[in-house]
Amino acid sequence: PRTAAVTLDAAYRPATGESIVGGDWYDAFELGDGRIALSIGDVAGHGLSAAVVMSEARQAVRASAFDADTPGEVLTRANQMLRGARMMVTALVGIFDPASSTFTYATAGHPSPLIVTPDYHVFMLPNGDLPLGIVDEIAPSVWTFTLQPGSLLVLYTDGLIEYNRDVFAGESSLAQAAAAEVRSPSEHPAKRLQDHVLGKI
């Protein structure tokens, strides 16, 4: 969605040729009351099977977001829909409210969101709870943070920070790239962060 309240950007790079039809997704859509829903997730594995489950998970999240009370409830409903898929899915669902500048989110085994404030402080936000599709019932925790104007919020899948099998180095590289983006904004911030972490620039 295009809105004066927030600028959205995204980048995707498959890990292998087969994963062009792989299991990662991202989504953003308006809820009709000015709020913006965001989701991102990762189905374990690659290929057609992962792509099918990814499509189901993405649609389950989107369908639930319009009438659920919290992002945690969205993930709970998505988990129920995916119990027969027999594939593990990590996911994050968040809602940004431009009226209050708040970001409310829940995770299911997904990497922590990252925030950079206008004065270049970098924070990894909390995460937790089991991935989708493992147990019958989940009850994800819900967190709410206020975003200062000019902040950068980064959502990503684990392929970005685990590509060289060193998660700590990947997280550090992402934090450095995100801080640099706030200091000197680019036209395509998502690709800039991706290229920095993956060593393309």
Image (spheres, rainbow, N blue to C red):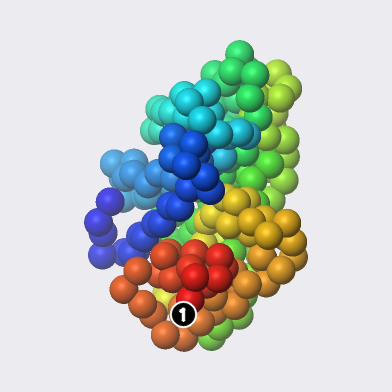
Give residue 143's position: percent from left, percent from top: 62, 51
Disc 1 is placed on an element classified as helix
Q: What kind of residue is marked 1?
A: Val
Task: State whether residue 184 is above or below residue 199.
Answer: below
Residue 66 versus residue 189: which sits nearer the camera? Answer: 189
Q: Nearer the viewer, residue 107 or 67?
A: 107
In this rendering, position of residue 7 left or right of residue 81? left
Q: What residue did someone put label 1 on?
A: 182
Residue shown at the point (34%, 44%) measured from the top left: 29
Can you give x and y, in whole percent of width and height, for residue 180 in the image?
51, 82
Give the image location of residue 176, x and y in percent.
59, 77
Say which of 191 and 92 sits in front: 191
Q: Is residue 104 left or right of residue 26?
A: right
Q: In the shown orientation, is residue 36 left or right of residue 169?
A: left
Residue 31, compared with residue 112, is above or below; it is above
Residue located farthest toward the front when viewing the structure as drawn: 17
* Total numbered labels: 1
Is residue 186 visible in the rendered image? The answer is yes
Q: Percent x, y for residue 56?
A: 46, 24
